[in-house]
Amino acid sequence: MDAKTPDPKSPDLNSGTLAVGDKSWSFPVLHGSIGPSVLDISKLYGQTGMFTYDPGFTSTAACESKITYIDGDEGVLLYRGYPIEQLAMNGDFLETCYLLLYGELPTPAQKTDFDYRVTRHTMVHEQMARFYQGFRRDAHPMAVMVGCVGALSAFYHDSIDISDPHQRMVASIRMIAKMPTIAAMAYKYTIGQPFIYPKNDLDYSSNFLRMCFAVPAEDYKVNPILAKAMDRIFILHADHEQNASTSTVRLAGSSGANPFACIAAGIACLWGPAHGGANEAALKMLGEIGHVSRIPEYIKRAKDKNDPFRLMGFGHRVYKNYDPRAKIMQQTCHEVLRELGIKHDPLLDVAMELERIALSDDYFIEKKLYPNIDFYSGITLKAMGFSTSMFTVLFALARTVGWIAQWKEMIEDPQQKIGRPRQIYSGAPRRDYVAIAKRR
Ligand code: CMC
């Protein structure tokens, strides 16, 4: 069912009434295929002269989308209708990319063709390498990502005409293909090692691990268990409905900006510790706690209204139940540690005990605060050899397909308009300019 058409089975539920003082207005109610219905207030200002006020968009649907569905109360995440658990355990990342972009799982022939198209675009323009040299060696790789991804629009002029469906798809494939190369280059630059070129006979995740960890002086053999874990981590992060960075990409794109610039905007938003930066922050927090004996002290701080400290990797705007991605992440974490022969990781001990205590504590139960995907991803990525500053970069790499699929969907939506929220103005009312000599 198209959300823009009313529900013929429940005509009574197709409109809602808003009353202010002695006036009332009727607005259509739209129904999605699953999930809460929405009151269509697009004509509210024209009819009533009032705006709605919803800081943080906690009650606002900004678009119609067919890509990802979340039921936060039940802990459900579906990509194009498929549960995240099934995709993460049975599929591979490029299959998920195809699904998010095209709406259906690929046939074997479509998958082969898609893998080939992505693989052919893994290299970046050689001049991009010189772009990196402009950054200080100690630059955070996310700073490098924002700059380099934005710079792609200066290199690939033949895929920035957003009105051309072919160019839109070429830009999408380029973004998915080049992100691992750009991310690995950002990593190599910060550790002072030479860039490693992509190797196109490797699968997406193996190629990425090789570009990060190989050095020209030695042969590098990809560990298939770690490559599988990396691939699963990418699937878990691939899309997440209208989160802050995706909304940023849509808003940037709504003005007609080119896709590379829009993705750079998404990366900038993702960097914040309340969003993608939480994986780095969560690992730092576990390290700071250091030992299970100190957990009560940190739980106390997290509950103290006068202390800004929060348990990083806990809580979510939408999930009021266990984040389904966190469960798979926890399992992947154990698999990676086992494969690497890490029998005892003090950070994992702290994480598991912290989770146990928090989940039985009234404060966390009442506020429905559960571990989110970032709680276990840091421990896993650290064990795989990534520095903490790379964690959010990996999130950005994986989320690129979600951003680009959402951007394409928006451009192709005939109802699309430039995003332009309004405000309640609470500043000074009109007043006259006073010459500087007369001001006291
Ligand atoms: N530790 C302690 N208390 C918390 C936490 C936490 N991690 N998260 C929320 N609360 C409390 C908060 O103090 C508030 O209490 P009260 O109602 O008494 O004022 C209540 O729970 C609701 O919190 P909120 O900040 O109003 O909720 P929100 O939906 O605006 O924020 C969040 C969601 C994810 C930003 C927040 O839970 C948080 O800061 N978590 C830590 C950072 C984190 O792990 N972020 C990763 C999110 S998942 C990955 C992604 O999608 O980016």
Image (spheres, rainbow, N blue to C red):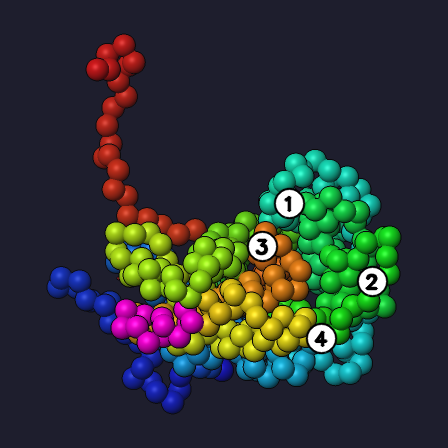
Gap between marks 2 and 1, in whole Å?
26 Å
Read off the residue under disc 2.
220
Measuring from the top left, give residue 316's x and y in whole percent: 41, 66
Tag 2's secondary structure?
A: loop
Q: How many marks?
A: 4
Find disc 3 in the rendering and name its residue: 388
Check if mark 3's residue and mark 1's residue have beta carbons within 8 Å: no
Query: Sequence-wise, which precedes: disc 3 or disc 1?
Result: 1
Going by the numbered disc 1, the residue's amino acid type is Val
In this rendering, is residue 196 above or below 59?
above
Q: How far apart are marks 3 and 2 (CA)?
A: 22 Å
Q: Which residue lies furthest to the bottom in this view?
A: 9
Q: In which quarter of the image is the C terminus?
A: top left
**Residue 100 quadrant:** bottom right
Residue under the point 17% across and 62% down = 20
Magenta residues span 353-364
Disc 2, disc 4: CB below 8 Å? no
Q: Which amino acid does label 2 sit on?
A: Tyr
Distance, label 1 to label 4, CA atoms, is 29 Å
Label placed on residue 66: none
Rendered residue at 28%/43% (across/down): 425
Mark 4 or 3 closer to N-term? 4
Marks 3/1: CA–CA distance: 15 Å
Decide whether the magenta segment is chiefly helix, strand or loop.
Answer: helix
Magenta segment: does it hold 268?
no
